[in-house]
Image (tube, coloured by chain):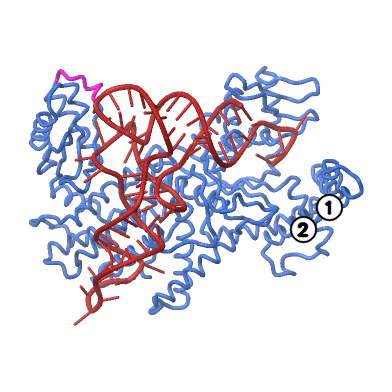
Amino acid sequence: MTLLAQIKLAAAEALQHLYPDMEMANAVITINQTKPEFTGDYTVVLFPFVKLLRQKPEAIGNKLGDYLIEKTGLFSGYEIVSGFLNLTVRDSYWISFLLNHFNDTRFGEKRGTQRRVMVEYSSPNTNKPLHFGHLRNIFLGYAASGILKATGNQVIKANLINDRGIHICKSMIAWQRYAGNTGPEDTNTKGDHFVGDYYVKFNTAYKKEIAELIANGMTEATAEKEAPIMTEAQELLRKWEANDSEVRNLWQKMNNWVYKGFDETYDKLGIDFDKVYLESETYLLGKNIVAEGVAKGVLYKKEDGSVWIDLTNEGLDHKLLLRGDGTSVYITQDLGTAKLKYDDYKLDESIYVIADEQNYHMQVLKLILKRLGEPCSDGIYHLSYGMVELPSGRMKSREGTVVDADDMIDEMISLARQQTEQAGKTEGFTIEELATLYNTIGLGALKFYLLRVDPKKKMIFNPQESIDLHGFTATFIQYAHARICSILRREELPILPPTPRFQGFTHSQDVTKAEKDLMVALEQYPNVLDEAGATYNPSLLCNYTFHLAQLFNSFYDEHSISKAENEEKKNLRIMIIVMTAQILRHSMNLLGINLPDKM
RNA sequence: GGCUCGGUAGCUCAGUUGGAUAGAGCAUCAGCCUUCUAAGCUGAGGGUCAUUGGUUCGAAUCCAAUCCGAGUCACCA
């Protein structure tokens, strides 16, 4: 049990015992970490009891404090400051905490119920390369997966690739017109970029054709519909759906180029999936669910044959589920895919990492499945995140303002190289080691930058200012870790020293403020991890880990480890830094961020 | 217009179920390397927590109204 939980429990018992007449149900016990300007570690807020007991806070605080000291053995003293009972935890508590956990590589994890949870993320279209916005999605999904796994779930990482539809046909028609049968290898282009280039070419040509038609007297609306390149793209889509082998072959060929490009990017990022769904294989699903719904009377059919659901009871609208010609709309296939996932894995929970522009869509999806009586409905959770914007506003692929993912990755790695060289820290590394290091630093910075903000908030990214490697960054955490490893190397200790050296450890000296601050923070890790899992919020780990690294840096500045005052202090501090490094690694690993031993 | 989300230092963001004088980072300024890695540490300045009212011992946090911004409300995906 965490210290906070122990204190809360002890306080509840104490109050029950001291004031049996007080209605505990009305008393909310609030325990906070004591503010740094006061002595103490944790604080019980006394105000709620003052009213119930009609006694002064000092009187309640004294009785409560005395009782807690006597009965729990957790505390060495207390102080009452204007309605707050500040409790000081015994040094011996911290020491035994350290001895128990300092080299526990799974500290903070829960061996839980092993619920089956799927996390769907990335989910790209295959008509253009990944951009900066996708990166937020990908990192969030990967991090959430890691956190959920560590908090006791069995996690399936899934990618649903949107490999069919009009947008792919646009790239295809442009390729047919302009590529002269060339491929990525002919132009030495990454496959996804190659196909993306033709998507851009489509839009350029489309715009030009519209302008010409308008110049010839056509209205804009008609021109948009009748521009030849658009009608040709639509013709491709029809042929694709009719299984035209020539069109299917081209489609397959271009998609394969794109997959190769995506895989390269995922590899660079260290991102992977356990299961890939292709929309071309799932887009027809859902129709029978809809048919069943009509039969059950949950859905209704209009005269033109289109199928709808009435959601006005929930304050929403009528929603179309099937077109009059019997073809699917977007949500139809989503209904089917939700059920497919559920049936494939017997999921307890199905998480969708999708931008907040689709909040309404996801709400409706869950609701419809519920109405249809599909058991997969309950487990659906939309991990909604805010879009990444530029200072000039939203990124628009048509206006060419998107920040490309591959470019960004390369820029970050090169920034890491520049800064390392500039700081003169390249000595003692081989060329290969340096390449790895730049990757670790560059990608770490990128991931941390996108994960450190609360997912539900939109974020503004300024490419000019780029991403810093100082302050609230992964680099800061990596640096703290490298410093610890450096000390351990000097002491000729492995990163996780075996316990015998510390087994007979006893303490006779007071712990210093810097030592205790660090131990207090270490003890809180399980709570933070738990909260990050419960709220699907990786940014909590960023905040916590940064804070821990900050505490370490202050500690490091104040105390020598290798040249500690005596053997006892040295061993204590080694345990502290070993555990600090262990938790830095553990938490960052969940986010997909590596920490180097040396930098 | 309906619904949803947001507004905290010059900028980017934290701020647990209401708790002490609202915190970090960046930027600015002043210090700290002969000592385990200065990608660091210490300190200073910087705030009408969008506005107004309410709830109470206590509100950035809860409620109401207003202002501003974003998203969404397709037989697009």
What is the crowding at mark 2: few (fewer than 14 residues within 10 Å), some, or many (at least 20)?
A: some
Q: Work out whether mark 1 precedes mark 2 in sequence or the reverse, and give the earlier one.
A: 2
Residue A117 placement (x, y as % from top left) = 49, 39
Indicate which label's residue lies in the foreground, 1 or 2. Answer: 2
User: What secondary structure is the stretch in magenta mostly built from?
Assistant: loop
- Residue in the picture at 10% in, 44% down: A76
- Residue in the picture at 8% in, 34% down: A66
Image mark count: 2
Dividing the picture into quadrants, the one containing residue A74 is top left
| Residue B30 higher or lower than A94, as above or below | below
- Indicate left or right for B58 with A208 as reference: left
Q: Which mark, residue A246?
A: 1
Which one is nearer the viewer's eye here, A283 or A30? A30
Question: Can residue A111 be seen in the rendering of this structure?
Answer: no
Task: Indicate the amino acid at tag 2.
Answer: Lys
Asked whether A489 falls inside the magenta stretch, the response is no
Residue A192 placement (x, y as % from top left) = 67, 59
Q: State the extent of the magenta-drawn residues as a range.
A: A20-27
- Residue in the picture at 44% in, 76% down: A421
Residue A297 placement (x, y as % from top left) = 67, 17
Task: Indicate the amino acid at tag 1.
Answer: Glu
Q: For marks 1 and 2, give the CA distance.
A: 22 Å
Asked whether A22 falls inside the magenta stretch, the response is yes
**Residue designated by label 2:** A201
**Chain ID for blue:** A
What is the crowding at mark 1: few (fewer than 14 residues within 10 Å), some, or many (at least 20)?
A: few
Which one is nearer the viewer's eye here, A417 or A157? A417
Which chain is disc 1 placed on?
A
**Chain ID for red:** B
Which one is nearer the viewer's eye here, A165 or A159? A165
| Residue A12 higher or lower than A258, as above or below | above
Which chain is disc 2 placed on?
A
